[in-house]
Image (spheres, rainbow, N blue to C red):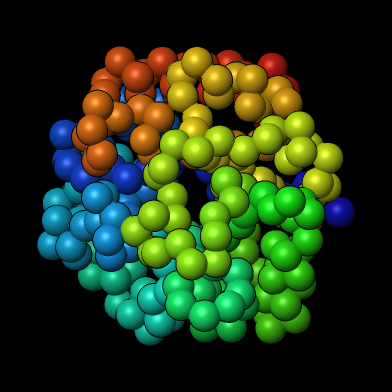
Amino acid sequence: MPPREPVFHVKICGVTSADDARMVAAAGADAIGLNFVPGSPRCLSSAAAREVVAAIPDDVLVVGVFAGMPAADVKRMVAEVGLDAVQLHGHLSGDGVVDLPEVCSDLAPLTVIRAVRLEPDGLGAARSWMAAAAALGHSPSMAVVDAAVTAATAAGQLGGTGATIDWSRFAAAGDLGIPMAVAGGLTPSNVAEAVAASRAVAVDTASGVESAPGRKDQAKVEAFCAAAREALAAKGT
């Protein structure tokens, strides 16, 4: 079976304004992430998100980021806002802010991207979650590998913190059977190294291209997109 195509190659997450959305798209990102996680400085209301979506070109994927929200509420937001895909960012197991495999199944037929954590033992927990989702009939189309957090981490602190992962450990952890993006602390100055050193076929950043939480810096966004696309092309992805 040929490898599956990634849902995106370069995603800029946590966009909060129409002006930033237009700028990010013009810079070369093929996906824009809108945050719906309570407690995050980048969290949007459905009304604010609709204004941002209206500024995004049709050929740029609009991804809604959720954590611990019931599938029915996620589907409602998808319809209200006009999202193209859903990214689940909650913990893989435990209590609190969790997105269980059953949520993925309940979101069918929507395109689902799963944020997972590179734990001390690698991607074992993520691999088990993916297998459970597959058994329930609806697997994520892509995984975003982010920095590890504690089980007690609150929803609004699950991403966008600027913490990096060990890219060589990511490379050694094996694949998940689906395309993988690297996230966590990516900036214009390190994204090429992250791509070269990991298994990633795509990249995802939020804080690494900001002047303040939720406010994108045009020079950083343009430099990031250019460096990412050059590195991905050199890798043949």
**Image-quadrant location for residue 36:** bottom left
Residue at the (30%, 15%) spot, across then down: 219
Q: Is residue 91 left or right of residue 122?
A: left
Which quadrant, please, contains the N terminus?
bottom right
Q: Position of residue 207 (x, y in %)?
A: 37, 35
Name the one closer to the observer, 224 or 8: 224
Q: Is residue 116 left or right of residue 97?
A: right
Name the one closer to the observer, 136 or 88: 88
Residue 22 in sight: no
Q: Is residue 96 left or right of residue 218?
A: right
Residue at the (69%, 17%) spot, across then down: 234
Which quadrant, please, contains the C terminus?
top right
**Image-quadrant location for residue 156:** bottom left
Above or below, 204 relative to 195: below
Above or below, 14 relative to 152: above
Q: Position of residue 67 (x, y in %)?
A: 42, 67
Above or below, 222 relative to 119: above
Q: Position of residue 221 (x, y in %)?
A: 35, 24
Q: Position of residue 28 (x, y in %)?
A: 41, 26
